Image (spheres, rainbow, N blue to C red):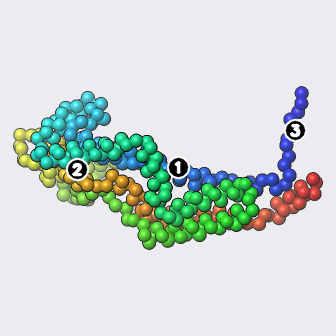
Amino acid sequence: MRSKRSQSFPPGTFIPTPQRLLAIIQLCLAFSFICWYAVQPFMGEYFSLRSRSLIYEYVMGTSEMLKKDPGQIPKMERQAERFASLPVYDKQLIAEDYKNLQKHTQRSAWIKIADGFRVLLVGIPPFELAWLLFSALISILILLKVEGAKQAAWLLPLIAFAYAIDNRMTGLTAQSNPDFVLFPSEEIIVKDYLQQPLHGNPDEQQVQLKKGWEHYLIANWLPQKNPGLSFEQQAEEAEFAFTVARLHHLHGQARSAWLNNFREKASPILLAFYVLWNLFFAWMMNRPPLPEQRKANMSKAASQ
């Protein structure tokens, strides 16, 4: 049998293992972020719009997801009756908004691909886009042992620092949905409607908060007080009125509002880690070899 002979490479064929590993990690990070941004019109936007569509379907009583539960079918039928009894203006507004939402969700794949490129070129802050491109390019050049690529790695912490400053100065404050103003705080629920302290058990707290939430709905959103209705029926009527008010607040909201998430202010800790990682990467690419490594390289070169 022929024994396999290990193939030997002359010294300097590959960059040192720590540098090679870091270059691969940096390349993977850049490529992962590029892919994540590019697929947002397919995934991020879909989940954002789908979650909003569920609110419309709940009000109109057409939610197929809830109808999969046999216990929810009677409630969906009651929701459909309530929706049919709404004023014409409210019904038309809700139905038209839902139709436009579905139309935007179902646009062709080519349009979504074009939107993905638009996100990469326009939606991402300039310094972040520069970091993505230079991280990928410099990492590839380092792995290919192109002269000057390691020195170019010092551009990355500079770009990262510029991005951190730009993000803190011009980044958008995280904005909640327009309907957020309708929701009371947990403190108000506990103090004004539950009127008892929360228990220590999380499961018991959930039951308590649900009860306080239902009391809030009945006190503020029940259209007409009807003593003949049970507490659960009153809570259901009030919840419907509350959800209709939510849809009025969501009317006119830009369907592409999720793009603002890319320009939100990041936490100082995250930005500091971002800068330090790139500084560490550039230093590792340019640090001189250790004395032991120099001796090993010289001995290998002499033995050739």
Q: Residue at x 17, y 42 (%)?
A: 236
Residue 210 in the image: x percent, y percent? 24, 47
Indicate which disc residue 166 carries: none
Decide: few, some or many residues near mark 3? Use Cα within 10 Å; few <14, some 14-19, many ≥20. few
Residue 116 in the image: x percent, y percent? 46, 50
- Which residue is tagged 3? 5
> Mark 2 falls on what kind of element?
helix
Front of the two marks 1 and 3: 1
Q: Residue at x 26, y 44 (%)?
A: 98
Q: Are marks 1 and 3 in contact (CB under 8 Å)?
A: no
User: Dividing the picture into quarters, in which one does residue 182 lie?
Assistant: bottom left
Left or right of residue 107, residue 276 in this image? right
Can you say which quadrant of the picture contains the N terminus? top right
Pick the residue in front: 90 or 231.
90
Pick the residue in front: 52 or 113.
113
From this view, report whether residue 295 is shown above or below residue 61: below
- Which residue is tagged 1? 35
Q: Residue at x 86, y 35 (%)?
A: 4
Residue at the extreme right of the image, as rendered: 303
Q: Earlier in the sequence, mark 1 or mark 3?
A: 3
